[in-house]
Image: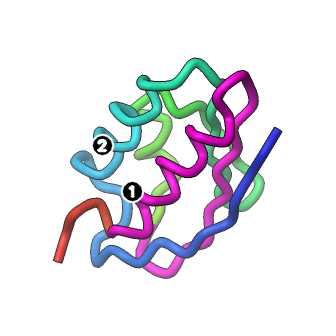
Amino acid sequence: MVSATLEITNRIGFHARPASLLIDRAKQFSSTLTLTKGDRTVGMDSLVALLKLQVKQGDMVTLSAEGADEEAALKSLVSLIEAKFGEK
């Protein structure tokens, strides 16, 4: 298992568009992917679960990946978050 802790820097945090982008990106990998905020962990396959975390700008989250392509999956998801989901 690999993981990375990141600060959410996009202006609005996880609203429907960024959460959907995360899920779409996660579907490209066979590894089990999770996102943790505080003491709550959710799978990266549920839009509702991601939105319920109420991730805002400045929050710290931990992405975890476990499986055959875990390194590539984590790198890809970290890159998406660090790019602020393409927002300005």
Q: Secondary structure at mark 1?
A: helix
Q: Which residue is the extreme one toward the right? A: 1
The spot of residue 44 in percent (x, y) is 52, 33
Residue 80 painted magenta: yes
In which quarter of the view is residue 1 placed?
Answer: top right
Give the total of numbered labels: 2
The spot of residue 10 in percent (x, y) is 33, 74
Which residue is nearer to you in this view: 68 or 57?
Answer: 68
In this rendering, would 51 be left or right of 70? left
Q: Residue at x 22, y 63 (%)?
A: 86
Residue tagged 1: 80
In this rendering, would 7 be left or right of 21? right
Q: Residue at x 22, y 48 (%)?
A: 17
Q: Marks 1 and 2: which is nearer the front?
A: 1
Q: Is residue 6 above or below residue 50?
A: below
In this rendering, would 40 be left or right of 30? right
Which residue is nearer to you in this view: 11 or 63?
Answer: 63
What residue range appears in magenta?
A: 56-83
Residue kind at label 2, given as amino acid type: Leu
Residue tagged 2: 21
In which quarter of the view is residue 41 placed?
Answer: top right
- Mark 1 vs 2: CB contact within 8 A: yes
Dot 2 crowding, Cα within 10 Å, few <14, some 14–19, many 20+:
some
Q: Is residue 55 above or below residue 53?
A: below
